[in-house]
Image (spheres, rainbow, N blue to C red):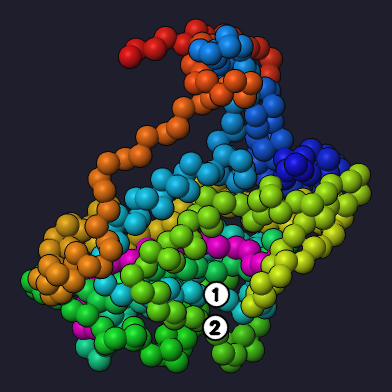
């Protein structure tokens, strides 16, 4: 199977040679990590099979958050954690995006632009929730996930998905307040307020004057989608949380000049193939690399770690509001037992294997060192 790493090994060198100092250091580090992932250049682990006695060498993973092969376990863990935190109430998926005229500005100022997206979207939700005409309380909890690509990974399309429970806690902290069935906020009001909040964020960042005047006259797009108990939307978002723009299983072929991949256009079920030059593929991949230490998942209100209101207290208020029969029938009760990871098995005989040796390699590959594995159990 052809992988993203294979494509980068084939075409990244030419891309770096052409653009040289114009390629950010962060992009260079991502390319270096992914192209060396599980090749042995980063070190590795030696496994001993308990059945046939064979030894197996496994190259060390790079662990980079933009690497397609290193994020599966993190995705599963995040999905399990967030599923346990869901409340047994209706939820909404609120998606904030920007007009296409602003995409180049955000691409040139990613950290500032993405912060503006998060700030404007979250502030819009909080302002409307606090409005007495709607929910009437500022004590709400939700989270947002940044997404920078669409169906075609070579297209730059920054937007943020917020998962918002349809309700909040009263200001005195004693009651759960629910929104009307199937309603969160008026769509037109959300769009108008979000545009104003985004303009404020750009003014504060000193980027407002770089936006064409007609952008502020256009209709901005915000989607408010009811998603039931929220479990389905978590499964939808989970791959985007720790996945990169294009996964290995979508690569069809990679030649000396071109890369062919599959994608599914919006609103369609049948996948199409697209062929781009190697340079286009590398550029399309790197435009989704996030700034260093940038938080692409952000929690607000009582979903945040620093909230004074504990999530268990919110659950208790929801329990009082809904009644215990609804709680048990809602399907939100999940087991507390953490599933154990399956053992690493021998490819030859299928027997479990155990680690016998770690091989550590310096970051520049100048030296290596083998460390025996001592099982403390």
- Local SS, label 2: loop
Q: Residue at x 55, y 75 (%)?
A: 97
The label on residue 221 is 2
**Coordinates of residue 257 in the picture (x, y in percent):** 91, 49
Q: Which residues are magenta?
A: 135-152
- Quadrant containing the C terminus is top left
Specify whether residue 16 is in view. Answer: no
Q: Residue furthest right?
A: 257
Residue 300 visible in the picture: yes
- The location of residue 263, given as percent across then percent down, is 71, 63
> Badge 2, how many Cα within 10 Å: few under 14, some, many 20+?
some
Check residue 265 for magenta coloring. Answer: no
Q: Quadrant of the N terminus?
A: top right
Q: Nearer the viewer, residue 267 or 183?
A: 267
State the residue position of label 1. 97
Q: Position of residue 99 (x, y in %)?
A: 62, 79
Quick one: 354 or 84, which is closer to the camera?
Answer: 354
Q: Residue at x 52, y 50 (%)?
A: 242
The answer to the question of whether label 2 and label 1 lie on touching residues, with beta carbons closer than 8 A, is: yes
| Left or right: 172, with 309 as reference point | left
46 vs 25, left or right, is: left
């Amino acid at each position: 199977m052809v992988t993203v790493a294979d494509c980068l090994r084939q075409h990244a060198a030419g891309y770096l040679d052409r653009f040289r100092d114009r390629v950010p250091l962060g992009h260079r580090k991502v390319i270096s990590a992914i192209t060396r992932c599980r090749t042995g250049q980063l070190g590795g682990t030696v496994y001993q099979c308990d059945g046939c006695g064979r030894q197996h060498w496994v190259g060390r993973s790079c662990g980079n958050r933009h690497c397609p092969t290193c994020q599966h376990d993190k995705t599963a863990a995040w999905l399990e954690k967030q599923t346990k935190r869901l409340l047994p109430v209706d939820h909404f998926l609120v998606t904030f995006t920007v007009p296409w005229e602003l995409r180049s500005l955000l691409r040139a100022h990613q950290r500032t632009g993405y912060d503006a997206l998060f700030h404007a979207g979250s502030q819009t939700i909080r302002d409307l929730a606090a409005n007495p005409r709607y929910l009437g309380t500022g004590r709400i909890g939700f989270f947002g996930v940044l997404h920078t690509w669409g169906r075609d990974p070579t297209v730059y399309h920054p937007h943020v998905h917020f998962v918002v429970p349809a309700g909040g806690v009263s200001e005195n902290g004693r009651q759960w307040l629910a929104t009307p069935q199937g309603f969160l906020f008026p769509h037109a009001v959300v769009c108008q307020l979000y545009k104003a909040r985004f303009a404020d964020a750009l003014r504060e960042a000193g980027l407002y004057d770089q936006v064409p005047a007609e952008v502020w006259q256009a209709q901005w797009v915000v989607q408010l989608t009811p998603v039931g108990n929220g479990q389905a939307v978590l499964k939808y978002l989970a791959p985007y949380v720790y996945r990169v723009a294009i996964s290995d299983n979508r690569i069809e072929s990679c030649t000396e000049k071109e890369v062919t991949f599959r994608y599914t256009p919006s609103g369609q079920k049948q996948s199409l193939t697209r062929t781009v030059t190697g340079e286009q593929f590398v550029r399309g991949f790197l435009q989704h690399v996030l700034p260093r230490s940038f938080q692409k998942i952000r929690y607000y209100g009582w979903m945040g770690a620093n909230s004074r209101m504990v999530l268990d207290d919110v659950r208790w208020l929801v329990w009082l509001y809904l009644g215990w029969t609804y709680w048990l029938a809602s399907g939100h009760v999940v087991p507390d037992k953490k599933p154990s990871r399956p053992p690493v098995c021998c490819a030859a005989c299928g027997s479990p294997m155990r680690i016998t040796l770690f091989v550590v390699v310096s970051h520049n590959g100048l030296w290596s060192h083998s460390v025996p594995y001592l099982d403390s159990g």
